[in-house]
Image (tube, rainbow, N blue to C red):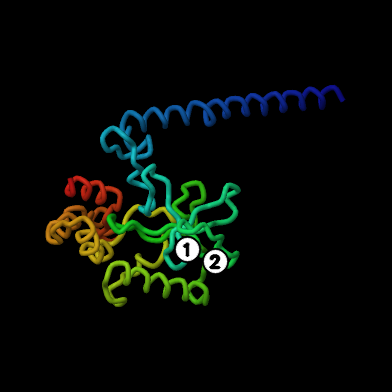
Amino acid sequence: MVTNLSTRIRVLGASLRAFLVLTVLLGVLYPLSMTGIAQAVFPDRADGSMVEVDGKEVGSSLIGQSFDLVDTEGNPRTFDAEGREVLATADGESYTYLQGGAPLTEEQAKGVGPLPDPKWFQPRPSASNYDALASGASNYGPENPDFVQLVKDRKAQVAQFNGVPEDRVPVDAVTASGSGLDPAISQAYALIQVDRVAKERKLDPVRVRALVRDHVDGRVIGILGEPRVNVLELNIALKKLAG
């Protein structure tokens, strides 16, 4: 009986020591060493690849974001399904029209949302509304009727917004990425936005088109993926071009 008890105590003690050693090695020393190496070798990437303009962080080159219409204070503006601007009530659960103050019906409120700013290049859609804490896809199957209709609606909207025929709208303009946070778009999608952006900013389309081509990143190691354009970096360059 004593032998069995002493054996159990030794096994328990060995297990406890192993637990403590592994906790320190894998839970403390390893994360700290990896963090230190990352900060020393890749400090920009380790800090989230943040992009600064005039000393102010405007986003991450790795995370997609929206470029919607905002007010003078930078707050998103909201519109009904017909493009009329609305305001949220104090409780944030209902809306009234900016002009006249008439309340929206429950059905009208379902169509309330932001509108893309025509002065900027737009990213691809996001199933998570570009929320980095809610990264994910819509999980719609390719034959889901709701998804098929959603793609058709997006295609018509993108074509109208950019003034191009629907057959010029590329796939990434109407489908979200798996994460919903893709920071890049295809060169084709960027190019169909050139005329609209140039018109809104009163710029020469030739210069804006050249700007797009200057920001095309090739395939990774020459074989992986497709040529792409980082939307945030392109819009920063566009702002500089527009002065």
Residue 189 as seen in the image, left or right of residue 15: left
**Residue plotted at (60% across, 64% down):** 106
Location of the N terminus by quadrant is top right
Instruction: Name the residue rendered at 15%, 61% in the picture.
Output: 205
Helix, strand or loop for disc 1: loop
- Mark 1 and mark 2: span between their CA atoms? 7 Å
**Which label's residue is closer to the chain start, 1 or 2?**
1
Q: Looking at numbered disc 1 in the image, what kind of residue is underneath it? A: Asp
**Residue at x 36% of width, y 33% of height:** 38
The answer to whether residue 41 is above or below residue 82 is: above
Task: Give 18 or 141, whichever is nearer the viewer.
Answer: 141
Residue 94: image tag: none
Regarding residue 14, the answer to whether it shows in the image is: yes
Residue 33 position, x and y percent, is 42, 28
Q: Which residue is mark 1?
A: 80
Tag 2 residue: 108
Mark 1 residue crowding within 10 angstroms, few (<14) / some (14–19) / many (20+): many
Instruction: Identify the amino acid type marked 2.
Output: Gln
Residue 54 higher or lower than 239, as above or below: above
